[in-house]
Image (tube, rainbow, N blue to C red):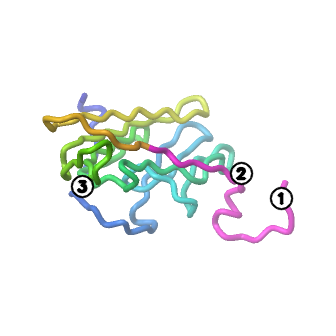
Amino acid sequence: MDDAYSVQTTAADNSDQDGLETLMALKDADTFLVADHWGDVKSGADGLFDRDTRLLSHFVLTVGRARPSRLSSGVTEDNVFFTCHSTNRPLPPMGGRSAPAGVLHLERRRFLWDKRLFERVRMVNHGVEDILLPLSFEFGADFADIFQVRGTPRLRRG
């Protein structure tokens, strides 16, 4: 990766803590994304916003029905690119075989451009045998305005 796009990485942290200290942001014009270190959006103060309206309120990646184990993640200094490296937790037998932890490497890369979120997920199997597993994305939208997300009650929407 070029020096201009170096990613600030963090030490491995597999805790499932939520809070403002674990959020990262991407920005392009009036569009911004706030997500945790795994790249997930969990319907809190996070989400994909455009013109102060939350368009995406829930976006979670699971591997084998579990959150991957994060190795490192970061956002470029200009808040344009996000990258997360993670690996699988132990996987139960599916299709006759189980997989130990750390056999799969997952890389999530994303950026915002022209009011759109682009994401690429790449998985590499470093094991000897093929692995069958469910890879899923859960997503949802609530179209709340930024004041509702911050806790200001509204009598009506619109």
Toward the front, the furthest residue is: 96
Left or right placement of residue 106 versus residue 27 in this view: left
Mark 2 and mark 1: Cα distance apart in space? 10 Å
Left or right placement of residue 148 versus residue 24 in this view: right
**Residue 49 drawn at (x, y percent):** 62, 47
In primary-sequence order, the first of circles 3 and 1 is 3
Amino acid type shown at disc 2: Phe
Query: Which residue is at a point 54% across and 57% down the rendered structure image?
Result: 46
Mark 3 and mark 1: Cα distance apart in space? 44 Å
Counting labels gives 3
- Answer yes or no: do the residues labelled 2 and 3 have beta carbons within 8 Å? no
Q: Quarter-wise, where is residue 77 in the image?
A: top left
**Residue 88 drawn at (x, y percent):** 27, 49
Q: Which mark is residue 90?
A: 3
SS assignment at label 2: loop
- Answer yes or no: do the residues labelled 2 and 1 have beta carbons within 8 Å? yes
Q: Which residues are magenta?
A: 136-158
Q: Quadrant of the N terminus?
A: top left
Q: Residues within 10 Å of mark 3 (few under 14, many from 20)?
A: some
Residue 20, relative to residue 137: is it above or below?
below
Q: Residues within 10 Å of mark 1 (few under 14, many from 20)?
A: few
Left or right placement of residue 87 versus residue 144 in this view: left
Q: Nearer the viewer, mark 3 or mark 1?
A: 3
Amino acid type shown at disc 3: Pro
Residue 81, relative to residue 2: is it above or below?
below
Residue toward you, 93 or 51 = 93
Residue assigned mark 1: 157
Residue assigned mark 2: 143
Q: Quarter-wise, where is residue 129 in the image?
A: top left
